[in-house]
Image (spheres, coloured by chain):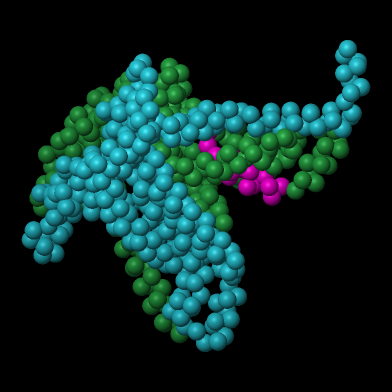
Chain colours: A cyan, B green
């Protein structure tokens, strides 16, 4: 029987089977882990969003789109969408402009550039818990250094920052800009170093000055990078959780509660997995929409180039 | 011309120094406050240099917080997650680039479609799954849920594509099997991409807050970030101690960052510009 089977397979087929086995052997360790811990949960979050379940032994119940109706009917949820969008509006553009500015400054041939680069990048790798703790103290409304400085420059009644519902998100946004601009500065620096120096030389021969070179070469050449940074920053804003959690805990009231704060609280403090997953799907749709914009944009840049 | 250039240079330096100081002031404030008495942190007028040094704050927090345990836990999580991530990503990347097998493109498509899905979207079902496996409140659960990422496979794959197939073909003719080609040729060539992934995973796991917040409940299992957070909510008004604890939590990452700075910067450039 064994011999008979052998004759059915040509050596080419045998090689094919062996190749398949080898291929799977390489991919499987990651594939199994990825399927179990990422792929299945992703599918499961769609299923959960149309179910009612508290995680107990009781079976889940299909409720259709009720969870979505519930969360959109929830004033707190609508608030979190608003807060997340206002956070994005306050952070994306300032981070982008400051990152570009720092990168242009550091792209000069100066001694000690590496030291400055380290200084600007450092907040990015510092942990959010430590950073949140120190900024909370800096923003302390009565004796904190930020307000001391504001008073010293003549602002008699400085904002009360994290304890004021109108200013808390501004405080979080300031810290976010400070923390993340160094990262995008590095992205810009890499892009700047990719611009061919022949462009600048040609412009010099034509008599262009520094500012003209900046506006007519550097900025246009950086457009794809700017687009990329814009997309990454926007997605990052919609995912914000840690910084808000350690600085304000979503408060005062619910003034700084963001979309992910909502998902977290629904799931892990009130154990309502249905609404939590519905919130997660809303986050997914937002991120997907931004990613699709990115794809169409990237296609455009590549066609142009 | 040369004086004009000199002036520009001086202006640039002044600008850069001002910006760098502004960026680093919070860290300076953190360090000096950690050396003050609790009641002097918010003294008015503000003091940029403490009158008397109180380094004993560090001894106090060392006694109040099981910092050694926290550091050990974090180091363990970081190390194991990084190693599992690296090994499985390299193997999978080799499979996706240098092997041909049925369903390869379909499987890869699965990775492609999920890479852009943020963790926050599936963290709830993932937590349910890990809990059902009985791994809630264990380090293993936290490691498993962080160790497999499409990003890692992508990053290494991108690098392996640039390794010419002729190199593997030559080795195959010389009688090396696939695993031998992977170990002796492709894996060693992939070091730059691995450095990037190592730094990326290391910082992510070391600084991760939300993962441990959801998964770890037992005090003895907590990470540095979670421990410091716990300390802050317990000793809310002991400002100097909080700052001392924060400084402690930053020291390891500062050391790693300063000694492997080049990889950090190259890593951002490599993973940031994927176009």
Residue sitting at x 58%, y 39%: B110
| Image position of B17 (left or right of B231) | right
Q: Which of A63 and A294 is in front in this view?
A: A63
Residue sitting at x 75%, y 48%: B164
Q: Name the dominant secondary structure of the magenta segment.
A: helix
* Looking at the image, residue A276 lies above or below residue B9: above
* Looking at the image, residue B208 lies above or below residue B165: above
- From which residue to which does the magenta span run? B148-163
| Residue A72, x across and y down, in percent | 28, 43
| Magenta region includes residue A230 | no
* Looking at the image, residue A228 lies above or below residue B153: below
| Residue B84, x across and y down, in percent | 55, 30
| Residue A221, x across and y down, in percent | 52, 70
* Looking at the image, residue A28 lies above or below residue A179: above
Q: Nearer the viewer, residue A120 or A232?
A: A232
Residue sitting at x 52%, y 42%: B115
């Amino acid at each position: 029987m064994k011999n008979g089977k052998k004759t059915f397979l040509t050596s080419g087929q045998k090689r094919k089977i062996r190749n398949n086995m080898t291929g799977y052997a390489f991919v499987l360790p990651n594939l199994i882990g990825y399927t179990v811990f990422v792929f299945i949960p992703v599918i499961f979050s769609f299923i959960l969003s149309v179910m009612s379940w508290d995680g107990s032994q009781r079976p889940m119940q299909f409720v259709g789109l009720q969870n979505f109706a519930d969360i959109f009917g929830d004033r707190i949820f609508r608030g979190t969408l608003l807060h997340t969008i206002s956070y994005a509006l306050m952070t994306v553009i300032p981070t982008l402009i400051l990152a570009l500015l720092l990168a242009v400054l550091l792209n000069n041939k100066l001694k000690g550039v590496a030291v400055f680069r380290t200084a600007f990048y450092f907040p990015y790798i510092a942990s959010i818990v430590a950073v949140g703790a120190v900024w909370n103290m800096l923003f302390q409304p009565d004796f904190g250094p930020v307000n001391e400085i504001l008073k010293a420059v003549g602002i008699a009644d400085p904002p009360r920052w994290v304890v004021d519902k109108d200013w808390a998100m501004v405080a979080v946004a300031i810290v976010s800009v400070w923390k993340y601009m160094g990262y995008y500065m590095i992205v810009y620096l890499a892009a700047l170093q990719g611009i061919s120096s022949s462009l600048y030389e040609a412009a010099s021969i034509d008599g262009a000055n520094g500012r003209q070179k900046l506006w007519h070469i550097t900025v246009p050449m950086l457009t794809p990078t700017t687009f990329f940074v814009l997309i990454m920053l926007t997605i990052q804003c919609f995912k914000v959780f840690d910084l808000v959690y350690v600085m304000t805990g979503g408060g005062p009231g619910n003034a700084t509660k963001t979309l992910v704060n909502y998902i977290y609280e629904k799931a892990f403090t009130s154990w309502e997995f249905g609404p939590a997953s519905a919130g997660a799907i809303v986050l997914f749709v937002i991120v997907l929409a931004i990613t699709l914009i990115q794809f169409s944009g990237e296609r455009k840049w590549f066609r142009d180039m | 011309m040369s004086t004009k250039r000199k002036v520009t240079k001086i202006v640039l330096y002044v600008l850069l120094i001002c910006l760098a100081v502004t960026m680093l002031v919070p860290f300076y404030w953190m360090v000096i406050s950690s050396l003050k008495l609790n009641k002097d942190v918010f003294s008015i007028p503000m003091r940029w240099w403490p009158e008397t040094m109180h380094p004993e704050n560090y001894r106090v927090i060392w006694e109040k917080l099981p910092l050694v345990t926290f550091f050990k836990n974090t180091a363990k999580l970081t190390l194991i997650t990084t190693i599992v991530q690296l090994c499985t990503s390299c193997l999978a990347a080799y499979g996706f680039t240098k092997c041909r097998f049925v369903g390869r493109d379909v499987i890869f498509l699965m990775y492609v479609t999920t890479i852009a899905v943020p963790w926050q979207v599936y963290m709830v079902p993932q937590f349910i799954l890990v809990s059902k496996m009985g791994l809630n409140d264990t380090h293993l659960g936290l490691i498993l849920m962080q160790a497999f990422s499409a990003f890692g496979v992508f990053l290494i794959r991108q690098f392996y594509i640039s390794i010419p197939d002729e190199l593997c073909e030559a080795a195959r003719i010389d009688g090396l099997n696939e695993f031998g080609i992977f170990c002796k040729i492709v894996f060693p060539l992939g070091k730059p991409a691995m450095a990037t992934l190592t730094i990326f995973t290391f910082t992510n796991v070391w600084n991760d807050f939300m993962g441990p917040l959801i998964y770890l409940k037992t005090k003895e299992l907590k990470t540095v970030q979670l421990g410091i957070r716990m300390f802050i909510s317990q000793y809310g008004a002991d400002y100097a101690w909080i700052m001392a604890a924060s400084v402690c939590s930053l020291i390891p990452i500062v050391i790693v960052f300063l000694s492997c700075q080049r990889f950090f910067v190259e890593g951002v450039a490599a993973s940031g510009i994927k176009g």
